[in-house]
Image: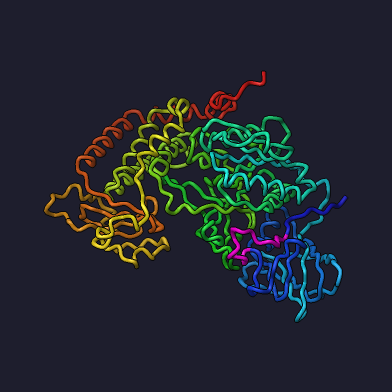
Amino acid sequence: MVTDIKLANVVLHVDDHAAEHPELYYRCAPSDARYDAEAGALCVTGAVDFLTYINGLSAIKWRKYTGIEQVALHVAYAGSGTLTVTGVRTDASSVEQIARYDLASEETLELVVQIDTSGFDLVGFSVAPTEGSTVSICRAFYTASVEEGSVNSVSLAIATTTFQNERYILPNIELVKKGIAAEGGALARSFHMFVVDNGRTLDVEALSDEVVTVLPNPNAGGSGGFARGMMAASEVPGAYTHVIVMDDDVRIMPESFVRVFALLSLARGAYRHAFINGAMLSLEEPTRQFEDVAYVVDNGAYRRIKRDADAGTLEGMLYNERTSVEVPNAYGAWWFSCIPVENIRQNGLPMPFFIRCDDVEFGVRNNPTYMTMDGICVWHASFEGRYRASVDCYQYTRNFLATVAVDDCASEFWTIQRLTRSIRLHLRDLDYISAERLLDGFEDYLKGPEFLAQADGSAIMKKLGALNEKHLDVAELDQAVLREAGVTPEVLARTDLVYRPSKVRRLLRSIPYDRHYLPDFLLKKKPGYVVKNVSVALESNSSRCKTVVFLDATRQHGAIRHMDRARFKAIRRREHALMARYRREGKKVRAAWKKARPYLTSREFWTQYLGIASKA
């Protein structure tokens, strides 16, 4: 028996966080489309193009993941005009017309258009009303006809973790409830949301119902929260086939769940067991896609597979959909990652890292195939300007070294070399705090898995967070020092994150030079400045300066640093001592981490660690 499966809805209402960027949804002149909330319809008075990031159909992905080529476009409309089916052929870069249909109905009528997507990477449509008239689009969606017996059984859970972040999680809960209720059908019957409350500040009884369950949890960080959500989703065999782990501080689009459900229902071959990762777009720049899938590099770092993509342009859409994310050592960040429950049962829960690298480690451990698609996404605050040594240095170092140890995903030798280089580069910029946190992370890694199994992650973060460098608004810094350092309005206005070293500066940063080794008479009393994006110096004029103005990547915040020779020497002595310890004990420590992973990722461990009462 043949059945129709909805692939995607056409989203007619522009979400408020993207109100200034309707081109994510449709392209038209500013006054040619208006959403009528009371009627629940988009009123079109001029030509409107729906071949966009959210509303275009990714033919290339549906064909690859599900084998589907024949689709149907359903448009419920009232008014007169034309509807044109459009597409971008494989290897082409421009849109062409596929078919054209007349619209003519005073009452709401559903037009159903059959589309053969073979040979096309993207498919969409546009609507143009007759001059002087309006076309009201009440709803629109894509379906595919498939054999009923070929549809995969899917039941979907969400596990989101929150810590005293009601301003995000409460609206997201409401969005999910309304979105799932509005969709109805198989998705509504096979869906549940677990909200893990690490702060224990949510009203459990008021928020929990047949769609949502709030789970109070100790503050065990992101990894502890996601572990608790995964445990709930996998507790009853067969209850859920997949769980979406999702950050709390995101703006979601319920349509993403509709597309995930359809993709899982129709996936074929190797993709039946694949993970799906939603893309992260920037809240500050809603058309900027930052990342969907990344991978671990052998030299001890992780990298995005794709560069930033402008999701508001056809070029950005094509780049995004045509770039493969199927690479070795891939992982999907947990702002939105859909994971088969069977993988959790077979390969375990997250490592108890508290924060950072839990998604990296889980990804490389499972070694899945990843699926991505335009319109499966969330919006998240950009990471630029959010540098914290307690997280970016301590947590990263400790947890990534452990990841390398348990999963053999990168060279330990080169990871250690990157660590020593990072220490040197931070010291060059008088960032003693970051250097110290790197060494803290290294030292705690050397303590082995027993330390992690007993560690109070919340207490560690509170202690180290209090030691983070205080970054002030640029306007609050000493303006005389800024002027003397050369921090001009032009310097503050450059926010493109482009690394602009001169050849000389590139050479200087590659050799073991440090101003602390120079006598005072060779140092400058005049201050300099450095602009950094995490550990990368985007711009600097601070060589031989005893005072350095630090600016973060946004150039809106910074600090003034002063040379401290005694602190420098203490850090170097500690570094040498820890490296000597690593040379003596490194192999033993690595073996201990590897041996401990099965237990640290087990339900037994997490049940005890989170203090979950036994049902026995």
Q: Quadrant location of residue 74? A: bottom right
Quadrant where the C terminus lies?
top right
112 left or right of 321 in image: right
Towards the viewer: 445 or 245 = 245
Vertical relation: 416 (above or below) 77: above
**x and y, in percent, of residue 362 in the image:** 54, 39
Q: Residue furthest bottom?
A: 131
Q: Residue furthest right?
A: 1
Q: Quadrant location of residue 581? A: top left
Residue 487 in magenta? no
Vertical relation: 113 (above or below) 226: below
46 left or right of 547 in image: right
Q: Residue furthest left?
A: 521
Towards the viewer: 613 or 607 = 613
Which residue range is magenta in the image? 10-24
Residue 253: in sight, yes or no? yes
Q: Quadrant location of residue 120? A: bottom right
442 left or right of 275 in image: left
Towards the viewer: 132 or 89 = 132
Residue 21 in magenta? yes
